[in-house]
Image: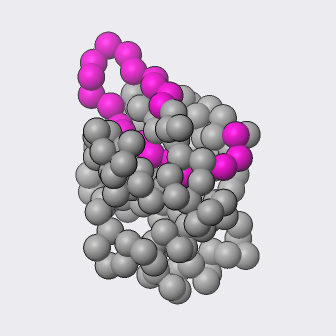
């Protein structure tokens, strides 16, 4: 069953974030990091590869979900791995922003296979700086990074 965590304050302007992660501790840690950024977001979670594919393509029980602004895709999901999901999507990835999480050992193979920009791959544990670096690779997310950095001044 999909779950959604929401951290929204006074306005409806927020980032729609999809996370495909089977480790509850990593989900909790990611939410802690997102809260530290001081942005408003809605987090939708898939716990296995089948749900992740449905979530990314917004099909099945995810069909009514809004388009994500950021996708955090774990590399080692049950039922279907992150690379298998990306292979199924082929060159027609339906969303402009996808960050793949995994170990340092897997990073180079995934980068070669899918030609992601280096900042689009976050090696666990997720940190504030890693999320900001990944967001900066996408023009649509740069205004959010500007807000985050202005809040820190």
Vertical comparison of 85 with 64: above or below: below
Q: Quadrant of residue 146?
A: top left
For this orientation, the residue located farthest to the top is: 10
Q: What colour scheme has been applied to the protein in the rendered image? A: one colour
- In the image: residue 44, left or right of residue 125: left
The residue stretch that appears in magenta: 4-24
Vertical comparison of 119 with 27: above or below: below
Residue at point 27% right, 28% down?
13
Q: Position of residue 84 (x, y in %)?
A: 53, 74
- In the image: residue 150, left or right of residue 24: left
For this orientation, the residue located farthest to the bottom is: 112
Q: Can I make out residue 25 in this image? A: yes
Residue at point 50% right, 52% down?
51
| Viewer-proximal residue among 67 and 136 | 67
Check if residue 91 falls in the magenta segment.
no
| Viewer-proximal residue among 121 and 61 | 61
Q: Position of residue 143 (x, y in %)?
A: 28, 43
Residue at point 53% right, 38% down?
1
- In the image: residue 67, left or right of residue 109: left
Check if residue 10 falls in the magenta segment.
yes
Residue at point 63% right, 74% down?
107
**Count of marks overlaid on the render:** 0
The quarter of the picture where the C terminus appears is top left
Q: Can I make out residue 121 in this image? A: no
| Viewer-proximal residue among 51 and 101 | 51
For this orientation, the residue located farthest to the front is: 60
| Viewer-proximal residue among 30 and 48 | 48
Q: Position of residue 44 (x, y in %)?
A: 46, 38
Q: Position of residue 45 (x, y in %)?
A: 52, 41
């Amino acid at each position: 069953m999909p779950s959604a965590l929401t951290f929204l304050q006074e306005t409806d302007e927020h980032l729609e974030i999809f996370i495909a992660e089977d480790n509850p501790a990593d989900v909790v840690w990611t939410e802690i990091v997102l809260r530290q950024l001081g942005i408003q977001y809605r987090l939708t979670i898939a716990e296995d590869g089948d749900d992740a594919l449905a979530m990314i393509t917004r099909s099945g029980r995810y069909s009514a979900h809004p388009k994500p602004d950021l996708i955090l895709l774990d590399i080692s999901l049950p039922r279907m791995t992150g690379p298998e999901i990306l292979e199924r999507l082929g060159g027609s990835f339906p969303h402009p922003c996808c960050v793949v999480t995994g170990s340092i050992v897997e990073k180079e193979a995934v980068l070669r296979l899918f030609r992601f920009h280096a900042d689009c791959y976050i090696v666990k544990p997720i940190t504030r700086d890693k999320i900001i670096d990944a967001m900066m690779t996408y023009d649509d997310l740069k205004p959010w990074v500007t807000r985050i950095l202005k809040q820190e001044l």
